[in-house]
Image (cartoon, rainbow, N blue to C red):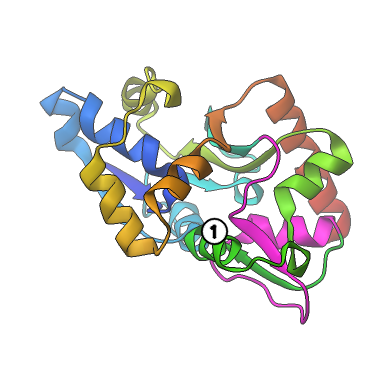
Amino acid sequence: MSMIFGKIDYINLLPFNIYIKKNIKSTQIKSIINYKKSYPANINKKYRKKQIDSAFISSIASRNQKCLDLGIIAKKEVNSVLVIKGENKKDIESETSNALAKVLKINGQVIIGDKALRYYHTNPDKNDYVDLAKTWQDKYNLPFVFARLCFNKNEKYLKKCVKNFDKRKIKIPRYILKQYAQRSGISEKNILEYLKLIDYHMGIKEKKSLKLFLKLTKEIK
């Protein structure tokens, strides 16, 4: 038996990735997990084709899928999902963020992930872009769910892997933080500040928000 896990190597999943690496002691579970790294939209495609068994997939792609109550969630602003004012342009890496911009009727260039966070920290003119999570919060008074942890099979193993995950208890080793800072061009301090904006556990408000978003995406098609 094996479990192929689609891994998105963005900063927003750093605590989860560290948890999986450090806290799963069982050699049996470790031996069945294999990783396929890619960006969100490509992970969605692989998931739909059942080339991977489990992954954080974009909220818009999670409709009617089997998912756990874990996701990538922004309570207010997120700083890593932006629309730069100007010519309309989608980000090929994210289906959900492109759909969110459309739902919110915000025109411009959608950028996500580490490159968006780097843009946020290197562009002092905050009027140059729109933070989609903050705009959603301002309009609906709800957090925004960008992705959900879903599975095609091996539900039992996946639940066992993640049952004790708690962002508050995750300490990021300095050497890993340094690696991410060098790779992304974002300072260690800014990475840690950014992670304070991200949550992972889906409660009543998060589920309500997701349901509303999926309803609105149906209406604009």
Q: Residue at x 50, y 41 (%)?
A: 193
User: The C terminus is located in which quarter?
Assistant: bottom right
**Residue drawn 70% across the image and 77% down it:** 89
Q: Nearer the viewer, residue 149 or 81?
A: 81
Q: Position of residue 152 (x, y in %)?
A: 44, 40
Does residue 1 show up? no
Residue 43: x %, y % from top left = 45, 57
Magenta stretch: give its range. 75-104
Pinpoint residue 99: horizontal percent, then vertical percent: 73, 59
Dot 1 falls on a residue whose secondary structure is helix
Quarter in which the N terminus is drawn: top left
Q: Estimate how packed mark 1 is, as few (under 14), some (14 to 19) or many (20 or more) residues with alpha carbons within 10 Å.
A: many
Instruction: Give the total of numbered labels.
Output: 1
| Residue that carries the numbered disc 1 in the rendered image | 117
Residue 148 found in image quarter:
top right
Extreme residue toward the left, this view: 27
Q: Amino acid at mark 1?
A: Leu
Whether residue 167 is visible to the viewer of this picture, yes or no, is yes
| Quadrant hosting residue 65 | top right
Q: Residue at x 25, y 37 (%)?
A: 173
Q: Is residue 123 magenta?
A: no
**In the shown orientation, is residue 184 left or right of residue 193?**
left
Q: Is residue 112 left or right of residue 176?
A: right
Q: Is residue 198 above or below residue 58?
A: above
80 within the magenta span? yes
